[in-house]
Amino acid sequence: MNRMGSKPRLSRYIVLLLLLLGLVAGPVALAGEGDLVQEVKTYLRLFYVDPVPEAALQANTVDQVMEALKDPYTDYLPPEDYQHFMETVSGRYSGVGMSLEQKEAGVVVVTVLPDSPAQKAGLAGGDLIVGVNGEDVQGKTVEQVSALIRGEAGTKVRIAFVRDGQRFEVEVTRAVIHLPSTSWEVLEGDIGYLKLNDFYEEAPQQVEQALEELKSEGVKGLVLDLRDNPGGLLQSAVTVGGYFIPDVPIVRVVSRQGEEEVMRTPKYEPLGLPVVVLVNRGTASAAEILAGAIQDYSFAPLVGTRTFGKGTVQSLIELSNGGVLKLTTARYLTPLGRAVNGHGLEPDLLVQDPERQLDAAREFVARERPHLIQVVPGRGEVRVDGREVAVSPSPFIAGGRTYVPLDFFAATLGAKVEWQAGAQKAVLRYGPLSVELVAGEPGIRVGDRVGQTDAGIILQGAQVFVPLRAVSEAFGATVEWNAASQTAEIRP
């Protein structure tokens, strides 16, 4: 089976919302193999993530089965639709270059690709499609309308649409449409900007190229834009994740039996740049997997609005007639176990105005991390790049080691800190890494690895102190002791 995920009602021909994890299963050898309805019901009984409603099992047609199931993510693709879908996976197809969405009013244009035939003909987001080649399409599904609009490159199609209450009709010449996954540029202040439109097959290669070019131009930070990214191939999302959060679990796929499959990102070199991620209501499916993992590991803040909330997994199952059943077979969770489906991801910085979101992200990423932190034990202040910053209670030396308050890392290194009183455990997260120390135990856990250190947590009343060198070096910082000034110097 080929696990997938999708944002409901968006055209699978233009924007791929599916998470593919394996191979498409072949048709079941049934006694009545030509009976499509029974074949679909058999797969529902075998693989559907929830108990199948009796109304679906009693239905007489495939459409009735889908209607009774009331699952916006489960659908039947006739053979020709499946062919169009596979074209979309490759990132190129023959059509006019626009994405469609099913709304109450009908099939509406969501986006139009730059320099596409649709854009040149004057179509735009928000247009209501009402006719194709003289045929009234009101009441048709987004899949049916998309199939009518598609056709061989060089042929023409007449599209009727309504905008602001007025009806228009245009003739559009179809062409081979290439769906670019990425675009990038350098913004003011030497901030890199990377727009990731989807997770097609070429997305990882394009992201790698974009990051190499941006870093070669000396950018000081990066804005990763996942707004209106409806998803794509899961493996592409996992691979892309390796450029930001390398060698960590990125998603937990939970089957209907409760079994978990954990997928890890590749072990690439750390990016080495501060990052901010832009999200909005159009950020869905695989894009939410990447954004959710980035947020879980505190690698980068999410800026914008709540994401879509698509957290179920679909499988593509080939049917005996050459069509495909797209069936909900599992759910996914973020690495920390957060359920996204129906909830979405809350941004760390809420910015409702779309026109303001990019500026807010650029300003956020421009805040430079400190280059040098100087700690003098016994003093209630530290120096951060030469500035005096108060710290309370004061750091101190015990057993030849410098100890600092747990909150020190939040105030200076920008780490997220948590004291779990019941477990007597300190948890610190900085970028893609997490560090755990338990009171009374000398070991230190860094991510999935347990290291050895004879410097543990010290509790003084309600205050928690952690060893400066052990924790700082666990996060990749260098720590030196300046004997002349009796100062611990940290370079993140």
Image (cartoon, grey):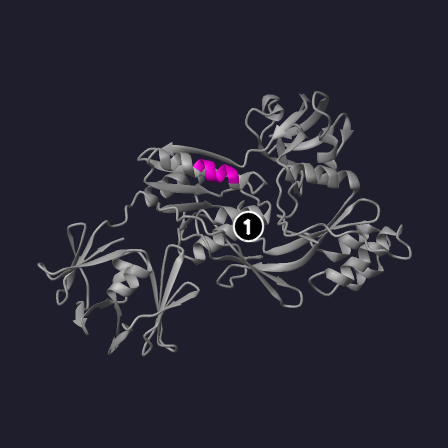
Q: Quadrant of the N terminus?
A: bottom right
Classed neighbour count for the residue bearing mark 1: other residues with Cα under 10 Å, few (<14), some (14–19), many (≥20): many
Tag 1 residue: 308
Q: Inspect this view and state whether residue 167 appears.
A: no
As helix, strand or loop, the secondary structure at mark 1 comes to loop
| On screen, residue 484 above or below 111 | below
Magenta-tinted stretch = 205-210
Image point 84% across, 60% down: which residue? 58
Residue 14 lies, in percent from the top left, at 64, 37
Residue 470 forms part of the magenta stretch: no
Identify the image quadrant of residue 91: top right
Please give the name of the residue rendered at 62% of the width and 23% of the height, measured from the top-left corner. 117
Hey, which residue is sitting farthest right in the picture?
A: 31
Amino acid type assigned to the residue bearing label 1 in the image: Phe
Residue that sits furthest to the left in the current view: 484
81 sits to left or right of 6: right
